[in-house]
Image: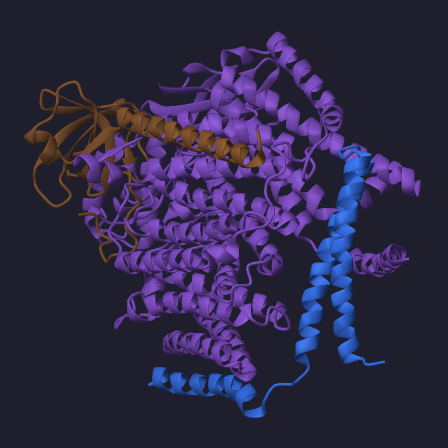
């Protein structure tokens, strides 16, 4: 079967090259047949990638260890869900995922535009084919996921336990959907530049893809943060790790892009800016894919030196140089007629929003690549940590949230003073009341920055509510519908607008959670023996007793041994029993001994998070199993050749020792206010984005009515 | 003021602001940064009282946990010179002998005293053949 | 062996799919309906703008004078698109 997979890759590469060639030939010579042929070739590539993926996935599901990837990343005792998702835990497999998504998305957009954009589409096809060809070339020449082993091992190495978490497994496909999604508007922008059709056509055709990409990338980033919080033993959700930053940067520029294309659609402005933004987004997406696998930056993700780093950098360089040359050569076609009328206009605020987002990205880029920059400038490799990142990004984040409140209210072209007063009266009043209430009833004043953020959040939420209310009221005066129906109709008929407002509300709520949890959390690290207590935040926490279990894998991750603790947390009247633990996975390293290898493998923290709307209680334990080592060594010697059953009994006995006589264990407990609102805010953002993306069936109805209305208007103006 | 002058003024203000912010960015980053060094570089010459990020591999059989405190040795990625490290705080899950780590702290009398919770361990390489911890 | 066979088979399959338009030719539907689709999309976008401006006015964001000016501009642009659509329609369906 591996031969079929490899064949799909080779034929796929050749087909992609053909697609590019045929499309370019069709574009230059005017041969429609060549263009159609090129498009069909892309469909073929998609089919080949689907076939290849099925071949690989079936190998994982069958635990076919003749496939090198399966032998390295899976095992017979890996739960099925993680067998299925192990494909993209590896470099080769994730290249295949990229190629799969790339070809599918390309097919979708080419199918959708098969009867329009006749001049642009062939060049866009060539670009998309070129990108697909690059990833296929990487696989065919260097990192073939279908490499086979001459001798298939009996058992595989298993999936890294740290990755055995549902969020971690959906995270890569989501990110890649985002990265690939942004390549679609990029390709069409390049096509538009080549044929000098720099109007809004390419934007209109690819807008949905940009939004889908933005949504998936954002969801992927959120899942990564959620995984970090719920699965890793440090209790945070964002560490400004280079790999985290690598996914955030394209998302920020993508956000700027989906705002500024609205300006081009409405006013024809910012054309140079838009093409530059989408090129930047795509380059950052490539960079993001590359950074995770290159090892050039110190990060927990950096998997050592990669074999394909140079190729990636070369490709990125080609994209940057080619796009820049193209933009510069088309500058005349890109200059817009319209100019900014007034600073008090939505165009102006979108521009400011763009500058803030680009500024955030520049800042994060600088900090992420600082080790390389400082080495180049001063000879010393230096790095900046989370405190620096937090310090420089917080002011920009504050401005961003404030803009999210102002933008929706300011109309296009120019705002009237009376209109502004009428729109901001209520939100500012509510903000003032919020400020006073926070100062009076909470200790928010302890963190001025958090306080400012809370005020801006209240501003956004009031503005969004006001917009919904005013819009509903306006609808009611026309249709006389009852409130709920009017509201529903309002949103349904203006999905882009109100979906967008919902996203703004979501991001405000997200920052509410971020501000509250970072400024007001209480974290305690202690070492306790059973029976001892400590305080964290408003909780009194007692270490009740240690736990040690064999074969009871509550997390469903395939861990044979679990050591943990039972804690009792009391706050006022509420009492919670907490069960943080640590899973131990067997190592493949036989040097540790037949018994010892069960204690020497990877270990992961199974955190106990008590989610709450007002606060989260997060606990983790690090049991000290050093005292078991004499027993383990003894068992290694005595039971080397015993059967599996006897070894299991021995292990259970050793594990029992811990339960009966546990040394002090290390605990971390964090009382974080309002952390859950980060995830709630993220979910609201996604919901809002989905509303904005969803095509409306009423559009057809409206088209008919509008035709007559416009025709009437036309005849009236002629009279 | 006619529109063209207004636009030029806006551009000038924006550019000045950008330059100032960029300057602030560069300044804060250089002053807040810590240098990354391998053990051989620190042994060769380290400023006393200056905090560094020590990177390298954990030497086999050098890990010892005594209550709260963890001691181990770090050696150059591709070399043999090593330094002893004393550390307290959260130990990341992937931490193991032979793995690459980064820890921040100061060199005091031949021992690298690490800052609390500053230990970072790189995820084990999944793309090379070595599954054994060496 | 499996690999070589698969390559040959897949190449043959792809070639068949890809050469079809070159061999059989493509339908001549096209110039007019293509333009039509692009114009329709532009028209839709313009109507959305008119409606958005209307909503802004009803919600009090735009003053009556501002709305009137913007509405007039947008409707003029919409009329241009309608005219172009008429030209395309006239070409395909000569009355």
Q: Residue at x 51, y 47 (%)?
A: A254
Where the C terminus of chain A falls, by quadrant? bottom right
Image coordinates of residue A285 in percent, x first then y, are: 43, 52
Q: Residue at x 51, y 82 (%)?
A: A34
Q: Nearer the viewer, residue C22 or A441?
A: C22
Q: Nearer the viewer, residue A364 or B35?
A: A364
Q: Residue at x 41, y 15 (%)?
A: A532
Q: Which chain is purple?
A: A
Q: What colour-coding does the image apply?
A: by chain
Residue A544, picture quadrant: top left
Number of numbered tags placed on the structure image: 0
Where the N terminus of chain A falls, by quadrant? bottom left
Q: Is residue B134 above or below residue C8?
A: above
Image coordinates of residue A52 in percent, x first then y, are: 44, 72
Q: Residue furthest front?
A: B2
Colour of chain B as rendered: brown
Q: Is residue A492 visible?
A: no
Image coordinates of residue C38 in percent, x first then y, are: 67, 66
Colour of chain C as rendered: blue
Q: Is residue B90 above or below residue A15?
A: above
Image coordinates of residue B83 in percent, x first then y, are: 12, 31
Q: Is residue A205 above or below residue B50?
A: below
Q: Residue at x 32, y 25 (%)?
A: B28
């Amino acid at each position: 079967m591996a031969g079929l997979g490899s064949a799909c890759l080779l034929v796929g590469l050749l087909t992609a090259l053909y697609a590019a060639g045929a499309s370019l030939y069709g574009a230059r010579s005017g041969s429609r047949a060549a263009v159609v042929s090129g498009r069909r070739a892309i469909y073929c590539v998609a089919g080949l990638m689907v076939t290849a993926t099925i071949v690989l996935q079936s190998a994982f599901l069958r635990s076919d260890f003749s496939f090198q990837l399966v032998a390295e990343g899976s095992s017979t005792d890996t739960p099925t869900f993680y067998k299925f998702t192990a494909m993209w835990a590896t470099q080769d497999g994730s290249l295949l995922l990229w190629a799969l998504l790339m070809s599918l998305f390309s097919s979708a957009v080419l199918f959708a535009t098969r009867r329009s954009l006749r001049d642009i589409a062939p060049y866009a096809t060539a670009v998309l084919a070129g990108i697909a060809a690059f990833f296929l070339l990487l696989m065919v020449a260097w990192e073939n996921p279908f490499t086979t082993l001459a001798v298939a091992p009996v058992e595989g190495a298993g999936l890294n336990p740290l990755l055995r978490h549902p969020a971690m497994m959906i995270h890569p496909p989501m990110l890649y959907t985002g990265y690939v999604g942004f390549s679609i508007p990029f390709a069409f922008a390049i096509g538009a530049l080549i044929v000098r059709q720099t109007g809004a056509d390419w934007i209109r055709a690819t807008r949905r893809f940009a939004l889908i990409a933005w949504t998936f990338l954002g969801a992927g980033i959120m899942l990564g943060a959620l995984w970090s919080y719920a699965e890793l033993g440090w209790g945070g959700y964002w560490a400004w790790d280079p790999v985290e930053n690598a996914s955030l940067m394209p998302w920020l520029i993508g956000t700027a892009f989906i705002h500024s294309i609205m300006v081009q659609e409405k006013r024809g402005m910012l054309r140079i800016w838009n093409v530059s933004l989408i090129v930047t987004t795509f380059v950052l997406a490539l960079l993001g894919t590359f950074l995770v696998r290159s090892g050039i930056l110190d990060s927990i993700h950096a998997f050592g030196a990669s074999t394909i780093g140079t190729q990636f950098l070369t490709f990125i360089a080609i994209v940057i140089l080619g796009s820049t040359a193209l933009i510069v050569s088309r500058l005349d076609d890109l200059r817009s007629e319209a100019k900014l009328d007034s600073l008090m206009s939505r165009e102006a605020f979108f521009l400011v929003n763009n500058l803030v987002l680009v500024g955030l990205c520049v800042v994060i880029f600088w900090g992420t690549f600082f080790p390389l920059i400082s080495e180049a400038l001063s000879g010393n490799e230096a790095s900046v940590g989370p405190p620096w990142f937090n310090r420089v990004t917080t002011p920009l984040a504050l401005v961003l949230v404030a803009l999210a409140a102002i933008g929706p209210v300011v109309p296009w072209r120019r705002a009237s003073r009376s209109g502004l007063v009428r729109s901001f009266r209520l939100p500012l009043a509510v903000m003032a009341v919020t400020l006073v209430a926070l100062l009076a009833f909470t200790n928010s004043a302890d963190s001025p920055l958090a306080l400012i953020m809370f005020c801006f959040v209240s501003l956004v939420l009031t503005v969004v509510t006001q917009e919904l209310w005013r819009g509903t009221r306006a609808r009611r005066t026309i249709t006389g519908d009852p409130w709920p129906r009017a509201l529903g109709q309002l949103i349904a008929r203006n999905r882009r607008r109100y979906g967008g407002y919902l996203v703004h509300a979501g991001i405000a709520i997200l920052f509410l959670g971020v501000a509250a949890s970072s400024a007001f959390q209480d974290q305690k690290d202690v070492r306790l023996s059973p029976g001892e207590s400590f305080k964290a935040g408003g909780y009194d926490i007692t270490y009740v007793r240690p736990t040690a279990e064999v074969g009871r894998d509550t997390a469903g991750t395939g861990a044979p041994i679990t050591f943990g603790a039972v804690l009792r947390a009391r706050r006022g009247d509420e009492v919670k029993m907490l069960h943080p633990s640590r899973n131990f996975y067997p190592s493949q390293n036989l040097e540790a001994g037949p018994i010892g290898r069960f204690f020497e493998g990877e270990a992961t923290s199974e955190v106990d998070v008590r989610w709450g709307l007002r606060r989260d209680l997060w606990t983790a334990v690090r049991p000290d199993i050093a005292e078991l080592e004499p027993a383990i060594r003894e068992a290694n010697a005595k039971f080397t050749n015993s059967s599996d059953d006897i070894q299991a009994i021995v292990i259970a006995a050793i594990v029992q020792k811990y339960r009966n006589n546990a040394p002090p264990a290390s605990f971390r407990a964090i009382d974080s206010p309002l952390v859950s609102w980060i995830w709630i805010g993220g979910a609201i953002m996604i919901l809002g984005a989905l509303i904005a993306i969803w095509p409306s069936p009423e559009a057809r109805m409206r088209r008919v009515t509008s035709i007559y209305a416009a025709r009437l208007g036309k005849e009236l103006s002629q009279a | 003021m006619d529109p063209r002058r207004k636009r030029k003024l806006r551009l000038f203000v924006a550019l000045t602001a950008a330059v100032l912010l960029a300057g602030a960015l560069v300044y804060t980053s250089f002053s807040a940064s810590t240098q990354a060094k391998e053990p051989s570089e620190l042994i060769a010459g380290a400023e006393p009282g200056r905090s560094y990020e020590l990177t390298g591999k954990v030497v086999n059989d050098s890990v010892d946990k005594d209550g709260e405190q963890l001691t181990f040795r770090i050696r150059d990625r591709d070399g043999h010179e090593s330094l002893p490290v004393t550390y307290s705080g959260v130990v990341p899950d992937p931490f193991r002998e032979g793995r690459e780590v980064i820890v921040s702290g100061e060199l005091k009398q031949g021992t690298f005293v690490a800052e609390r919770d500053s230990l970072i361990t790189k995820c084990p390489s999944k793309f090379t053949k070595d599954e054994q911890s060496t | 062996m499996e690999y070589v066979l698969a390559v040959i088979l897949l190449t043959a399959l792809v070639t068949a799919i890809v050469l079809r338009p070159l061999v059989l030719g493509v339908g001549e539907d096209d110039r007019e309906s293509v333009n039509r689709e692009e114009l329709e999309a532009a028209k839709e976008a313009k109507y959305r703008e008119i409606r958005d401006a209307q909503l802004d006015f009803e919600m009090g964001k735009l003053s009556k004078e501002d709305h009137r000016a913007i509405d007039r501009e947008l409707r003029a642009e919409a009329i241009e698109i309608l005219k172009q659509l008429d030209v395309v329609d006239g070409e395909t369906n000569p009355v």
